[in-house]
Image: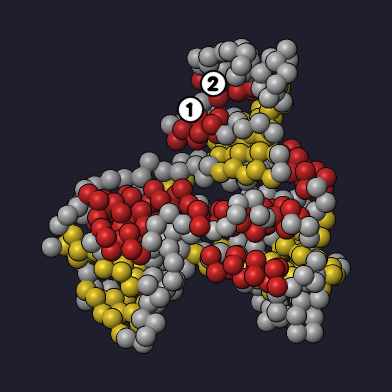
Amino acid sequence: MKKIVVIGSNHAGTAAINTILDTYKDCEVTVFDANSNISFLGCGMALWIGEQIPDSEGLFYSSKEAMLEKGAKVYMETPIDNIDYKHKKVTGTTKDGEKVTVTYDKLILATGSLPIKPNIPGMELENVQFVKLYQNAQDVIDKLEAKKDIKNITVVGAGYIGVELAEAFKRIGKEVTLIDSANTCLSSYYDSAFTDLMDKNLKNNGVSLVYNEMVTAVEGNGKVEKVVTNKGSYVSDMVIFAIGFRPNTALGKDTLKVLDNGAYVVNKTQQTSEQDVYAVGDCATVFNNATEDIDYIALATNAVRSGIIAGHNVCGTKLETVGVQGSNGIRIWDLNMFSTGLTLHKAKKLGYDAVSTDFEDLQKPAFVKEDNDNVKIRIVYDNNTRRILGAQLASTLDISMGIHMFSLAIQEKVTIDKLKLFDVFFLPHFNQPYNYITMAAITAK
């Protein structure tokens, strides 16, 4: 019987474990995780904090008990002390102090990522918070409930998590300051024509935006009182650092090949530089179809896909990734924004002769008054090859399904010209005969 060890059991690990246990009955699966819970959907953290959902119960989709029922051996709250790659042995220590050593035929590393912690004064103060695990969110909520004097909250980092948390804290009546060293929010996902929409949305809902400033210290007497930047200071009763994540690869960085940021380099089967070791999720690289190269894109969707791929390959069924585009979306109050592939700014920075075509129009004909509003679209493409490199959409309407088409277009190397006259249905209840997708393509130079 093939012995498979999986280290880490959140999104990527759970996907790999379920794939193995559901499909291959001749495998013995042992799972290690340093946490006390699994499958927490961090993307729902802001909804919980902002009281848009009643509690955290629905943010879990699996459990230790579910894995045990399928036949896995599971060690929770058991951090790994050492991996002997030469002799294929994993050693961990349980919460009771017991040493556990397990041998493997195949090893899957699903150790995820860790929040980046800045090396600045004051990080030890009370109410300096990070957001990643269930426990992080619970700690924030407990403090907000217990200490009604927490009124001013500063969020450092205006990426997806930071923006979502800014909304969440405003929803529960807090004064919120959002700080980022960039000149706008969401700069990794959108060009300025779209980030301007989100900045306006945040301002209109009372979030104080502080851009082009770097946090240099947190100050206070025992607990946070102010956040200091290179240009000023901001009164704060709590500060949330959401400045990004780094791959959690301490267990293999000295043995396995890694990217510049420390992520395990994997091939299209999720195999690392060590033949019998696979890596999945946030600790591993992905193949980016937009750049046609390996990349690091930490998304739950990528994690799940990589876990499924690794699960099949360790059991002898070859399955390769088709690559990713980094498709993503966000909803803040009534503004929905979606993107996939490269922004125009990033495409140019990477050396592409990139151009974009923009269009804005109503989703439905003007005579349809109900559930109708403008949609803004940008398609980024290579001026030489005409290949689509990215797309961005924004509207108060749910136009999310459109980004899936663009994701597939990037994957399949579709050109902007192919979109000009492709078959799009029309019915006034849903769209326009000359809709924003085809019009953006038709007006492309």
Could you tell me which residue is drawn at 54 percent across and 21 percent down? 419
Which label is found at residue 203?
none
Circles 2 and 1: CB atoms closer than 8 Å: yes
Disc 2: CA contacts within 10 A as few (<14), some (14-19) or many (>=20)? some
Instruction: Kindly tell me whether residue 109 is visible in this rendering.
Output: no
- Disc with the residue nearer the chain's start (2 vs 1): 1
Q: Position of residue 346 (x, y in %)?
A: 62, 45
Q: Which amino acid type corresponds to the residue marked 1 in the rendered image?
A: Val
Disc 1: CA contacts within 10 A as few (<14), some (14-19) or many (>=20)? some
Could you tell me which residue is drawn at 28 percent across and 63 percent down? 68
What is the quadrant of residue 155 in the picture?
Answer: bottom right
What is the quadrant of residue 274 in the picture?
Answer: bottom left
Could you tell me which residue is drawn at 53 percent across and 42 percent down? 327
Query: Viewer-proximal residue, 340 or 80?
Result: 80
Q: Position of residue 77 (x, y in %)?
A: 40, 75
Helix, strand or loop at mark 2: helix
Q: As drawn, which residue projects farthest toward the bottom?
A: 97
Image quarter where the N terminus lies is bottom left
* Tally of numbered tags: 2
Could you tell me which residue is drawn at 44 percent across and 71 percent down? 35
Residue 395, relative to residue 156: is it above or below? Answer: above
Q: Position of residue 135 (x, y in %)?
A: 55, 69
Residue bearing the label numbered 2:
419
